[in-house]
Amino acid sequence: MTEQATVNPSNPVKKRSQLKAIWFRYRKNKLAMFGLALFLSLVLVAASSGLFLDYDTQVIEQRMRERLQPPSSEHWFGTDQYGRDVFARVVWGTRISLFVGVFTVTIALTVGTLFGALAGYYGGTVDNVLMRIMDIFLAMPGTILAVAIVGALGPGLVNVLLAMAIARIPQFARIVRSAIISIRGQEFIEAAKACGTRDGRIIMRHILPNAIGPIVVQVTLHMATTILGVAGLSFIGLGIEAPTPEWGSMLSEAKEWMRYHPYLMVFPGVAIILSVLSLNLIGDGLRDALDPRMKN
Amino acid sequence: MLRYVVKRLLLMIPVIVGISFILFVIMDLTPGDPARSLLGEYARQEDVDALREEWGLNDPFAVRYGRYLASAIRGDFGKSYRTNIPVVQEIISRYPATMKVATLAILFAMAIGIPVGIISAVKQYSLVDFGSMATALLFTSVPPFWLGLMLILIFSLMLRLLPSVGTDSWKSFIMPAAALAAAQMATMTRMTRSTMLEVIRQDYIRTAKAKGASQRYVVLKHALRNALLPVVTVVGIGFGNLLGGSLIIENVFGISGLGTLMVNAVKSKDSPMLIASVMFAALVGGLVNLAVDVLYTYIDPRVRSQYVKG
Amino acid sequence: MEERLLEIKDLHVEYVTDEARVFAVNGLDLTVNRGETVGLVGETGAGKTTTALSVMRLLPDLVGRITRGSIILDGIDITRATEADMRLIRGEAVSMIFQDPMTSLNPVMTIGEQIAEVLHLHEKYDTKEEVEHRVDEILRLVGLPPERKGEYPHQFSGGMKQRVVIAIALACEPKLLLADEPTTALDVTIQAQVLQMVRELKEKLNTAMLLITHDLGVVAQTCDRVGIMYAGEIVELGTAEQIFQKDERHHPYTVGLFGSIPDLTRKTRRLSPIEGLMPDPTDLPPGCRFHTRCPHRMPVCEVESPRPSYNGGHLIRCHIWDDRRCSQ
């Protein structure tokens, strides 16, 4: 195919038209669109669950007389060992998982971008020191680091979120750094420097917008792994604790009853899979849309 | 080459020391008193104080860390606060279980992931390709512990084929390894497929076809070796992670390996145990990484000549 | 002596992708006789490489396909041969030198292995020693020291790599060699050397060659006959003398091509490149494909495809030179 007519790439200077082109390519990817639709409906569920569910009476209140009922028209997903409606708890769990996913990644991204940008832009000693520290964090198994930090901060949703965020900072720092290094040397940065633009402004206005592609992809994929990670920690009792309807801790409780009430395990598990799947699909779709060369 | 390996090994030392420092700080910030938790809630205060004195917990942070480093250099990583057994001994006795699960998991993942990835690439857009890509996508989204529970439900509780907990026989390792392998397998399938697709389009593949080689020959003899580098990287990272011990899967299947050791150490504020086991996991990960880099030089002559020069 | 080795008749090749259908070759007729060198000249995108790949039947999988026509090589119709037959033909009866020597060699195999491979695939020799002996011989033939056969492609310069590629192509002494811009990726000084070597080897082995290029200088030095290609068609075909004869009849496109290279014997202020671009191969113009850029365009050119007219073996596909039209 060496002899195909080459189409002159239209100058992708305008940010908006570039976004449009990315959206155009993204839209054509059916799986990615499915992921986006799935994610948006999960967001909708999370946002609206507060309107039709009362946390105290419908999500955590125990009704021992109704315990361990299989799925029925009254309790779509059945009830758990304390008589709580599993459907209500799974729905409420969406709020928790999405909240944790979004905020963990936001914190890790902000701090990681700061470190990565400093290291990538200044290079030299700053880069060396910062990245060696990041290397130390990266050399530790991620889960145990989060577990140790939770141990120091104490349990609870916010602390788990912080621990997960800290454990992820080095990864974002590394991605941002390499994205910046690849842009730093380009001529328009030299031009901005020659014009006397301040470093902070060059980083914020010129470098980061151009590095945004790979970062956005990582954000979605990390949200997926964060949701998985938090569920895992809660499952072994080191994350978000009962009675909060976190999917992992629900599974931890359901484990005791799995022999005779396996449905208790199915629904929270499927909820985790769907939310993680939606984010993975979006991440993959974005990667392909941002870099059409990579699409196979 | 040897010089390079030695250099890399030396570079691991500051990382390991760094880990010990970070964990020392984190454990120092963790509330709770290990002496109290060992002796129990109703132990006499004098006994607790005596034990704190013996462990040197009353000294300032710098003194305690300095003392730790000094004895670590001599190879003494301390005794567990919880069991009073030297931590190194404890790690050595627990590690085989983790290593078996990790090795079995990576073998499962490679045995399925790489061939499926190759077939997917060669038969791009076929039913096989769609099927394996969908499965891979699903496997990256399934929590391993949930998969483990499902396996227990099916193979232990319903079919009664495999033991659900423990490490008594080789059968015990199948389910935990499978639960851990799923995600690795998915990554390998996707990575193998995408690099194979890239390699298959290269000019030298066309050259090989122009020589009169069959599709199968071209894929196995020319494409695979060129596609191996990224695949080996993925295998290496995955194996390194698995060898660090899985906290959650070990918990699900009641395996007392490195992961369980770490979790228990955090729970009982057993700093010597935690620091030593995390350092050990990092060391193993680093060694696997190094092994992968050395392996590169056997796969790709271009990498090899870089080392010869520098 | 005029025995036909390769005969391409009415070849049509398309590339079909999600976005578009590319008409790469549209009714191409071409013959190559034994031992002869035929040049195929045209701009990028004219369908030259596609033609050569069709002869090898190595068009990109799933995308490219021959939709009409036949390619007879030494009595066998390539378009109908089985894949197993093609494996025997490739490398043995016909081989190809690709454009870019930098990427045409497998980076993880030694050059010796890569040359020996084609001999193995066609079971040329029984013992390993014989194969190795032949590899040494071929390396010497292309001017490379046999001692370096244990080295990898990245240890060689571009010109040397192209020599390796040529060695692979000639290892089985094929009847036909397809050379796709064999010197374009090389430095000018190396270009001459490599070209000279190809010419000598061709003579020695009595190989026919289809030389694809957009360099008219190369054509003049090397080719017996020349075909000018435009938008997937041959618009003019003749002996090198006929094509390079200034006062002969020519296709306006050929005239344009010659106008776009500097002539040192005349004092011209500026070059006169052909105006406009190649037509979009997904949406070819009706009538004569060249009419959108032709300085001598007539109304008929926009509706009717010109028939070929012959003048002593010199083919031109243009309404201006269509004698039947003139006599009407």
Image (spheres, coloured by chain):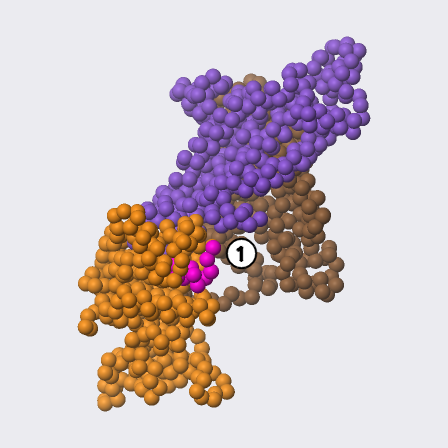
Chain colours: A brown, B purple, C orange
Q: Nearer the viewer, residue C89 or B264?
A: C89
Q: Residue at (53%, 21%) from the top-left corner?
A: B255
* Whether residue C290 is situated above or below residue A127 in the rendered picture: below
Q: Nearer the viewer, residue C4 or B265?
A: C4
The answer, for residue C286, to whether it is visible in the render is no
Q: Nearer the viewer, residue A53 or B85?
A: B85
**Segment tinted magenta in the rendering:** C155-165
Q: Residue at (44%, 25%) from the top-left corner?
A: B174
Q: Nearer the viewer, residue B301 or B79?
A: B301
* Whether residue A291 is situated above or below residue A254 in the rendered picture: below
Q: Would residue C158 be counted in the magenta stretch?
A: yes
Quarter of the rendering occupied by the C terminus of chain C: bottom left
Q: Horizontal and vertical percent for residue A117?
A: 68, 50
Question: Which residue is under mark 1?
Answer: A22
Image quadrant of residue C76?
A: bottom left
Q: Horizontal and vertical percent for residue B91?
A: 59, 22
Identify the subunit bearing mark 1. A
- The secondary structure that most of the magenta stretch takes on is helix
* Whether residue C13 is situated above or below residue A182 in the rendered picture: below
Quarter of the rendering occupied by the N terminus of chain C: bottom left
Q: Residue at (61%, 55%) from the top-left corner?
A: A182
* Whether residue C14 is situated above or below residue B131 in the rendered picture: below
Q: Tag 1: residue type?
A: Ile
